[in-house]
């Protein structure tokens, strides 16, 4: 068989992700706040871009001189100062020695759990070695108040507690006796039980500090927490040797007097308000869509650098090449931002068209909708619609919703009409919230109630929806006291 070299032409088609396409895809899936941050960073790094929403920029990058502020008709600062001096008896409190300001020594409310426990540790008066050991232990306490130094895996309570002491000894070089002693001190701090390694240890520490100690409560926590979680009071009563009524009283004390998460309320994340990306307003019989461009930079190509490229001048080839690269980058960014806004508008416009009855009449009329329906309607790929609906919120006359809320599969009701899954979940939620807490409904009963309202689902489907909205089974929801 002979070998030879030859040339031939071959025509193929490949999908190439150009820089422009990559930028457009990246911008499309960003939320409004992320987009504003990215555009502002680009304005700072690209001299060709100008932000018209900021201070006026003259040619050459010089800021326009600001006009001197006009003097107000009334000097309000002097007026307020005079009133303050009058009400305080003419005493000037504006200058005070720092050491005499006792208010500055009072810690502000709130703070993290570790700061709260560390402050108590410093006030306890331990020697330096124990203080360093205590700080190491506090540094490994999580937000719920539990000591986490290693992965628990399949270890039982006693094994895990011993393994935690051994791991701290390995990391710090301290003896297990010293570690147990310092840990016991920390566990008595406020909040009581913080630094516990297991739920059993946390509840036991709190139970032993009750004003009146109850041995039944302690024994239930010590050996029968699993049965207590399953509400198997008869088995606990038989194992402990008391009546079921006494076990029920112990369960009531554990439920009302003990805290399984002692770290709750410390260092939690602050609530973050949702800023809608799109607004839908009803004007007459029509729904108008407007994009939230509050804070969005208004981009423009710098005329100064355009003139440099047109005039030729004395700028070197390297400088011109740099300006041309930045100019292309700026044009791509401006076009991609405009394309993003147009795509979002078209997707929301299509959603309004499909979900008009929901906007008019409420959740019962939310139609089943999938990404393919919107993609086919506006002539784009399904992945584009998925990126548009990611991390974006819309404000409607019925409240603020994530765009993904309008997309859900459906089920056929008795009348042959399709019902959205979100509507079924809301029905399940209302059924559970209105039930008798002492006689909670089973999943089969929930399915029967749904059937009476024209929604036919299987028991397993009712179970799936109940778990999806965060409700436990009927045995776990039952209230005994």
Image: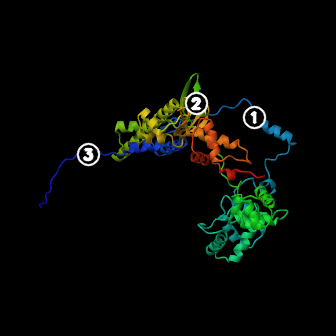
> Is disc 2 placed on a helix, strand or loop?
helix
Of 226 and 309, the residue lying toward us: 226
What residue is at 82 percent from the left and 62 percent from the top? 210
Q: Is residue 25 above or below residue 303?
A: below
Q: Position of residue 388 (x, y in %)?
A: 49, 40
Q: Is residue 443 above or below residue 148?
A: above
Give the mark nearer the N terminus: 2 vs 3. Answer: 3
> Is disc 3 placed on a helix, strand or loop?
loop
Question: Would residue 293 be seen by someone viewing this image from the given angle?
Answer: no
Residue picked out by circle 3: 12
Q: Between tags 2 and 1, which lies in front? A: 2
How far separated are the C-alphas under marks 1 and 3? 76 Å
How far separated are the C-alphas under marks 2 and 1? 49 Å
Give the mark nearer the N terminus: 2 vs 1. Answer: 1
Q: Position of residue 250 (x, y in %)?
A: 79, 60
Left-right relation of 397 to 302: right
Of 210 and 434, the residue lying toward us: 434
Residue picked out by circle 2: 359
> Is disc 1 placed on a helix, strand or loop?
helix
Question: Would residue 279 be seen by someone viewing this image from the given angle?
Answer: yes
């Amino acid at each position: 068989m002979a070998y030879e070299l030859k040339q031939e032409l071959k025509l193929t088609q490949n999908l190439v992700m150009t820089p422009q396409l990559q930028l457009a895809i990246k911008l499309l899936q960003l939320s409004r706040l992320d987009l504003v941050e990215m555009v502002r960073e680009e304005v700072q790094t690209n001299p060709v871009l100008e932000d018209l929403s900021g201070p006026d920029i003259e040619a050459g990058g010089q800021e326009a001189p600001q006009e001197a502020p006009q003097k107000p008709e009334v000097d309000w600062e002097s007026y307020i100062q005079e009133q303050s001096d009058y009400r305080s008896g003419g005493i000037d409190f504006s200058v005070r020695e720092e050491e005499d300001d006792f208010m500055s020594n009072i810690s502000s409310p709130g703070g993290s759990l570790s700061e709260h426990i560390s402050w108590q540790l410093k006030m306890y008066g331990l020697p330096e070695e124990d203080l360093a050991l205590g700080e190491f232990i506090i540094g490994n306490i999580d937000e719920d108040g539990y000591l986490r130094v290693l992965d628990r895996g399949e270890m039982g309570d006693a094994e895990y507690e011993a393994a935690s002491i051994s791991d701290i000894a390995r990391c710090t070089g301290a003896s297990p006796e010293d570690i147990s002693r310092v840990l016991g001190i920390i566990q008595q701090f406020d909040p009581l039980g913080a630094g516990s390694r297991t739920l059993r240890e946390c509840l036991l520490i709190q139970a032993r500090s009750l004003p009146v100690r109850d041995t039944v409560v302690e024994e239930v926590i010590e050996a029968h927490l699993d049965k207590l979680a399953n509400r198997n009071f008869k088995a606990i009563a038989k194992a402990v040797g008391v009546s079921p009524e006494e076990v029920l009283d112990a369960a009531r004390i554990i439920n009302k007097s003990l805290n399984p998460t002692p770290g709750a309320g410390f260092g939690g994340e602050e609530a973050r308000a949702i800023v809608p990306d799109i607004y839908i307003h009803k004007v007459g019989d029509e729904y108008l869509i407007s994009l939230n461009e509050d804070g969005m930079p208004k981009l423009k190509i710098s005329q100064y650098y355009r003139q440099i490229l047109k005039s030729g001048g004395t700028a070197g080839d390297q400088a011109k090449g740099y300006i041309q690269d930045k100019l292309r980058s700026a044009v791509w960014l401006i076009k991609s931002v405009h394309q993003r806004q147009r795509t979002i508008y078209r997707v929301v416009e299509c959603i309004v068209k499909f979900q008009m009855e929901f906007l008019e009449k409420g959740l019962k009329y939310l139609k089943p909708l999938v990404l393919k329906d919107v993609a086919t309607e506006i002539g784009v790929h399904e992945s584009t619609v998925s990126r548009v609906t990611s991390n974006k919120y819309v404000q409607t006359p019925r409240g603020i919703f994530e765009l993904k809320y309008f997309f859900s599969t459906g089920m056929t009701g008795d009348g042959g009409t399709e019902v959205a899954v979100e509507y079924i979940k809301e029905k399940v939620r209302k059924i559970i919230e209105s039930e008798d807490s002492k006689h909670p409904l089973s999943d089969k009963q929930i399915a029967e109630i749904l059937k009476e309202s024209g929604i036919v689902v299987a028991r397993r489907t009712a179970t799936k929806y109940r778990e999806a909205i965060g409700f436990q089974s009927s045995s776990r929801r039952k209230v005994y006291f």
